[in-house]
Amino acid sequence: MKRTIALFTLLLVPFAQAADPRPPSQIIAKAPAEHWRTVDTENMLYLDLERGRVVIELADAMAPAHAANIRALAREQFYDGLNVYRVIEGFVAQGGDQSGAKPVKHGKRTIPAEFSRKNVPAEHFTPLPGPDGYAPQSGFIDGFPAARDPATGESWLVHCNGAFAMAREQDIDSGGTEFYAVIGPAQRYLDRNTTVFGRVLEGIEVLQQLERGDKAGGILENPQNNRILRMRVAADVPQKERQQIEVLSTDSPSFAELIAARRNRPEDWFVARPNYVDVCSVGVPSRQKSSQ
Amino acid sequence: MKRTIALFTLLLVPFAQAADPRPPSQIIAKAPAEHWRTVDTENMLYLDLERGRVVIELADAMAPAHAANIRALAREQFYDGLNVYRVIEGFVAQGGDQSGAKPVKHGKRTIPAEFSRKNVPAEHFTPLPGPDGYAPQSGFIDGFPAARDPATGESWLVHCNGAFAMAREQDIDSGGTEFYAVIGPAQRYLDRNTTVFGRVLEGIEVLQQLERGDKAGGILENPQNNRILRMRVAADVPQKERQQIEVLSTDSPSFAELIAARRNRPEDWFVARPNYVDVCSVGVPSRQKSSQ
């Protein structure tokens, strides 16, 4: 008889959980320490503008040449004193060397495209259920919104709000120094047309508050109003000026619970629940590391 | 013989068009006058903030009670001197009477929800091909991004960037005066949980440049920095201060061509084309009427 009760109790547990799901805010607040990953300071950029700091995580595993190049450029202080010279409402903010004349020392002016990667191990990809019109499958790779094509084995990072990518000319290998960030709605049609090599962890509002361009293509008449004070690799900044940031691991149980709660919001306020969430609407949580 | 040539020529026309598709910018620039519709000034609101003007088109056909109520509130100058008191980065800007104490004269404090409508005629819905994870079908109704469920006959407006909607408390019929606009990425999980009753035609950047809230829920400590100078119905403004705005008709051949071009960008620069566009990424073009 005891055994039967125990079995019944065990069977009940999943139902009890399903009947009492937690809202996203609670899942994030209560996620245990081991579900968070500390961002490697070698993969973290500080882009300091007049209006504040933008913190970027580089996707070193998905675009190693682009990550290495922007680290080299930041270390030679290439971006310091340049501008975010192209800002288009609801689209992107683009910065770097508009003139193309500033000498590059250790970094490279152009690097081959890294639009996608083959053979990202399946366990590095956390798939989302449900359709994605832009790709056979979408989900997350190590904290970055991503997509994959199981037929070809290709994986790529996608253009959600905050995507950090490299502008290019007609030639697919012509980018290298002119970065952009998606400051508005997702721009998924750009997926695999440029190299996405990071994402904005903090300070997207700093980019959004920049002056918009007035000329064709969003180019600013006076780009010095959007001046880049400096860009630094976080590892190079003295410890006490460094922000330590944690990202909720996209392969953790807390993140799986978050996806479920985003698909069907459990709060009583909701009367319609779509049983769906798209890759750009999940939001990968990040926070300042509390122990610092 | 002539007849055969003529037939052959006719057959070739669609192929010639398909082989030489136009990019979105050209489709919009070249759309003939009869593909544009002038926004009814009774359905147009001017929300004037310190930083500039936000122009909103009301979806009178989809949410007639909400459209009528905000017209009444604008006409009694209810919003003048109130604030956009809640601004959340990447989410919404909400304005109105935070105190709930300002007397309402001709408008109503609360009105029944208009989350969706039954029996919108099929010819008023321009469907998008391809999947939409949030709804059985998505597309456009008279210029507004929308969704529908053919099984129930329900149609509703969706939360893309620029959606203009009514905040509410727990009770679904508790909204009436506190409007919000989506200032960042789409928030589709809110669809059918609030009444979307318009969209921002111009000036979304004015809302995006507002000060963000610092307290819980994005509430501003000093909302008077985001003060509403006035809200007016365009029809009530002297002709010479009025902006006449046209919207590309979403049931026009130009809009159909625009959808096709957004699904597969024809410009040579693109090397990957998803053969897809989601309802929030099409962008319904609007412009100042040139003859004014």
Image (cartoon, coloured by chain):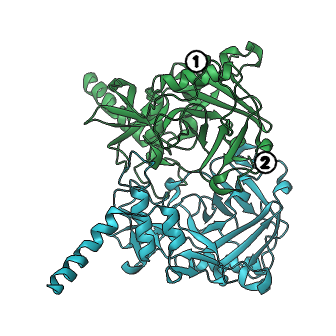
Chain colours: A green, B cyan
For mark 2, does the 10 Å Cα neighbourhood hold few (<14), some (14 to 19), or many (20 or more) residues?
A: few
Query: Is residue A20 something that shows in the picture?
Result: no
Local SS, label 1: loop
Q: Position of residue B24 (x, y in %)?
A: 48, 62
Q: Total of numbered circles in the picture?
A: 2
Q: Are the residues at dot 1 and dot 2 in contact (C-beta closer than 8 Å)?
A: no
Q: In this rendered view, identify the residue nearer to me: B210 or B288.
A: B288
Q: What is the chain letter for disc 1?
A: A
Q: In this rendered view, identify the residue nearer to me: B179 or B2.
A: B2
Is the N terminus of chain A in the top left, top right, bottom left or bottom right quadrant?
top left
Q: What is the chain letter for disc 2?
A: A
Residue A269 vs A11, above or below: the answer is below
Q: Which amino acid type corresponds to the residue marked 2 in the rendered image?
A: Asn
Instruction: From the image, tell me which residue sits under label 1.
Output: A40
For mark 1, does the 10 Å Cα neighbourhood hold few (<14), some (14 to 19), or many (20 or more) residues?
A: some
Labels 1 and 2 in the same subunit: yes
Instruction: Report whether B258 appears left or right of A47.
Output: left
